[in-house]
Amino acid sequence: MNIAESNSSIGLTTISRTMASLAVGVVHTLERAVVGDGRMRTARGNAWEAVCADRARADRRAELDRLVAELTAARADATRPQRERQPVG
């Protein structure tokens, strides 16, 4: 076996890598053509969307915590005896 014969064989992994590379190139080109350069998704854009989603989730959680605290306080107030709720005077 000489050197030329060992380098000329193409393995399954080489074909798979080539096909994956071509597929990524096609998808990238298609996205650029359909959406336009200004609206293409980037790592920075994805990170910003994740930050915004985290903030929105935190806001919803804080609002829910506030509502639960109000309901808990109202329920505690309703369960106290009547004489404790009325001011003496």
Image (spheres, rainbow, N blue to C red):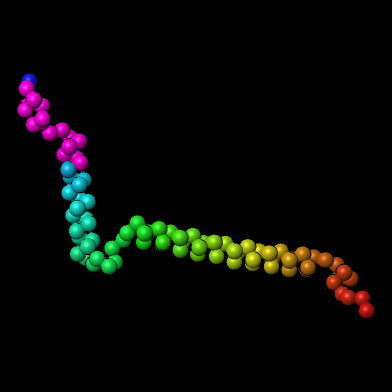
Question: Residue 78 is drawn in which quadrant?
Answer: bottom right
Report the residue at 22% width, 55% height from top: 27
Question: Residue 74 falls in which quadrant of the image?
Answer: bottom right
Secondary structure predominantly adopted by residues drawn in magenta:
helix
Q: Residue farthest to the top?
A: 1
Residue at position x 50%, y 64% in the image: 56
- Quadrant of residue 2 within the rendered picture: top left
Q: Position of residue 63 (x, y in %)?
A: 59, 66
Q: 61 or 25: nearer the eye?
A: 25
Which residue is situated farthest in the bottom direction here? 89
Task: Report whether 78 appears left or right of 50.
Answer: right
- Name the quadrant of the C terminus: bottom right
- Which of the two residues, 67 or 7, is positioned nearer the viewer here? 7
Whether the magenta-drawn stretch holds residue 51 is answered as no
Give the quarter of the figure containing the N terminus: top left
Q: Residue at x 19, y 64 (%)?
A: 33
**Residue 21 image point, x, y percent:** 20, 47
- The residue drawn where x is 88% and y is 75% is 87
Horizontal and vertical percent position of residue 19: 17, 45
Q: Is residue 60 above or below residue 25?
A: below
Residue 12 within the segment the image draws in magenta: yes
Q: Observer-nearest residue: 42 or 82?
A: 42
Query: Residue 17: x, y in percent?
Result: 20, 41
In magenta, the rendered stretch is 2-17
In the displayed structure, does residue 60 sit left or right of residue 39? Answer: right
Figure label count: 0
